[in-house]
Amino acid sequence: MSNKLDFFKTFVKDKDVASIVPTSLRCVKKVCTNIDFTEDITLVEYGPGNGVFSEYILEQMSPGSRLILIEANEDFALMLKKNIQDPRAEIHNILAGDVESILNPDDIGNVDYVLSGIPFSFLKKDRKKIVLEATKRILKQGGKFLAYQTSGHLKKPVKEVFGNLETDFEPLNIPPYLIYKVVKNGV
Ligand SMILES: C[S@@+](CC[C@H](N)C(=O)[O-])C[C@H]1O[C@@H](n2cnc3c(N)ncnc32)[C@H](O)[C@@H]1O
């Protein structure tokens, strides 16, 4: 409950938080069925908020996997640094579009998954493209971009950058989410 209250307080202070409560565990699990936890993976998460996906992912991930969290809100970033004491995780208080600035050069083009909860609908068209293109550059061939959004507004820009898209829907979450599933094929 206090998690939900802290989340709501952060939402009141920062419109970019975009949701009044964290994503439900049901929705977290549904999105994460697209991740192969039997392998060692590098997963970058944009907009972890209070860490509802991050905690689930760390429970599922192998000891050799890595989780790189990119959170724009300073309060959430501090909360994550305090609550996540796991050597496989690192937390950065930056914007998703600047992800390449914190990755090791060796990681660029070798990331297995990018998971995103950021409200792309709040970004201007050119900024959306900057984030999607940086995401494509950091993913390996065959790597997946997974995003949960409140509507289909991201379909066109995703298809323009990645050339493919599958969607799923989670109606019972607050808010209901459209789940975007994209594979990096080609440069
Ligand atoms: C809808 S909330 C999702 C929070 C959490 N992942 C969840 O599922 O409950 C959106 C999150 O994205 C963060 N955010 C918004 N714009 C961002 C950006 N450009 N880069 C990184 N994080 C961003 C917000 O601070 C917030 O934590």
Image (cartoon, rainbow, N blue to C red):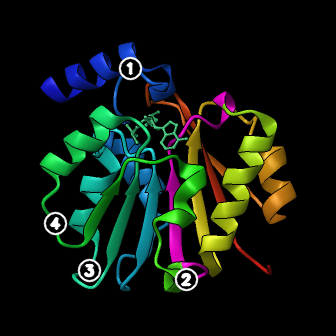
Residue 37 is tagged as none
Res. 1 in view = no
Rendering quarter of residue 89? bottom left
Q: Is residue 147 magenta?
A: no
Measured Cα–Cα span from mark 3 to mark 4: 12 Å
Measured Cα–Cα span from mark 1 to mark 3: 32 Å
> Comparing marks 3 and 4, which lies closer to the viewer?
4
Q: Is residue 119 magenta?
A: yes
**Marks 1 & 4, CB-CB < 8 Å contact:** no
Query: 182 or 50, which is in the foreground?
Result: 50
Mark 1 Cα within 10 Å, few/some/many (few <14, many 20+)?
some
**Marks 3 & 4, CB-CB < 8 Å contact:** no
Give x and y (percent) for residue 20.
Answer: 39, 20
Sequence order check, earlier mark of 2 and 3? 3
Q: Secondary structure at mark 1?
A: helix
Kind of residue indicated by mark 2: Asn
Residue 11 is tagged as 1
State the residue lying farthest toward the front.
Answer: 101
Residue tagged 2: 110
Q: Secondary structure at mark 4?
A: loop
Residue tagged 3: 62
Q: Write down the region rendered in magenta.
A: 108-122
Res. 20 in view = yes
Give x and y (percent) for residue 40.
Answer: 36, 85
Kind of residue indicated by mark 4: Asp
Kind of residue indicated by mark 3: Ser
Measured Cα–Cα span from mark 2 to mark 1: 33 Å
Mark 4 Cα within 10 Å, few/some/many (few <14, many 20+)?
few
Sequence order check, earlier mark of 2 and 4? 4
- 126 relative to 115, above or below: above
Mark 2 Cα within 10 Å, few/some/many (few <14, many 20+)?
some
Q: Residue at x 55, y 35 (%)?
A: 177
